[in-house]
Amino acid sequence: MQVKIGIDKIGFYVPSYYMDMRELATYRGIDPNKWTIGIGQEKMAVAPLTSDVVAMAANAAASILTPEDKASIDQVIVGTESGVDFSKSIATFVHEMLGIQPFAKAFEIKQACYGATAGLQMACDYVRLRPERKVLVIATDIARYGLNTGGEATQGAGAVAMLVSAMPRILAIDEKSYMHTNHQFDFWRPNHSEYALVDGQFSTKLYQDEFVTILEEATRHHPTLLDSLEAIVFHLPFTKMGRKALLAYEASGAPESHLSRWLSHYDQASYLNRMVGNIYTGSMFLSLLSLLAMDDSLQEGQRLGLFSYGSGAVAELIIGQLQPGFAAMIDKAAILAHLERREALTVERYETVFLSKVCEEDTPYQALESGYYLKKVVNHQRIYDYQQ
């Protein structure tokens, strides 16, 4: 009998600040319904300098790891498009900060919002060959499009960490997945540009096309696969994106039974994304966590589809099965408390935080809460600390 491999633990971290989307829309002279209903966003996580992508990654992972886990981890894989260095990976920082056993490898993956999905698949492949070992996969990003721009409402910040192991207690991942690459310029950020460049309408249409293409390819290989999926979790740069993909699938002639079943889980699967915003590589995994935490109708043995999309463009449909006792691994109260701890910013303060830059200063940064944080920069080297 083949050993099951997949997600044994999952945790997340969002910064301690957020911007209310109604307040921001009103300040910008925009109908708030355009953002809260039109794209489905209520709050946007805002990252202070101390909560950079390294600190967020470490905090997300620290929330799920035990000393025994750290002794069994052979790889730390980080998916991001917000790296802090062109050469040194975020994973090397996190490996040291968390005290993971030294005879491990640590590296970073980049392919827009798809990167962490590649990391998850690499982790599963590694553990299938070494079922006694574990891999830590982290998605961490700060989505930035600039102030008072067309993309401002689809910004956000956060990290999701997953521990991949044999005999996982949350989600077993199938070996077979369905992927597609399509070289396009719907979203990209040249090395010289501080902000990403995006063709919004084209990107949305490309996302929809990739979803339909992947599902058609999956059906060609496995005609009954989609019948077996209780829900589909989407990459959600904004919470309405997945609905748009389902409408495109409907227009292609999809069975009504598929759509109604998948839509019945959609609001629960997008709740956390609605409250956090876009976290690039972590958006699909945040949606998975949202589904697990908010949907009480899920049952062990049910199969889920995870649709990952990274502009440029790479898409993949991963299939997973909920494991016995999975609900006990998800602390809904702690997840909601983590969101509720946040401080709402005024627009003026949000803009100040957004425009602030990391620089070398004699005075270290002060931690805003307990956990890992960026303390200072010395000789162009980022130094982190832990606040009790």
Image (cartoon, grey):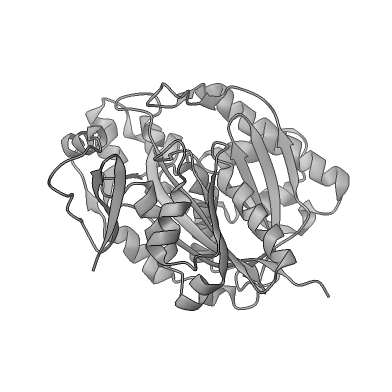
Residue pictured at 44% horizontal, 34% vertical: 38
Q: For residue 288, which quarter of the picture?
A: bottom right
Image side of residue 70 versus residue 96, left or right: right
| Left or right placement of residue 297 versus residue 176 in this view | left
Q: How many marks?
A: 0
Residue 374 image point, x, y percent: 27, 51
Determine whether, in the image, residue 348 is placed left or right of residue 311: left
Residue 194 image offset from top left, x and y in percent: 37, 26
Residue drawn where x is 51% and y is 44% of the image: 281
Q: Position of residue 113 (x, y in %)?
A: 54, 40
Question: Can see residue 170?
Answer: yes
Image quadrant in which the C terminus is located: bottom left
Quarter residue 340 falls in: bottom left
Give the image location of residue 131, x and y in percent: 69, 71
Which image quarter is the N terminus in?
Answer: bottom right
| Residue 320 at least partly seen | no
The residue closer to the viewer here, 359 or 346, is 359
Q: Is residue 58 left or right of residue 128?
A: left
Kindly identify the residue that appears in the image at 17 percent across and 53 percent down: 366
40 and 288: which is toward the camera: 288
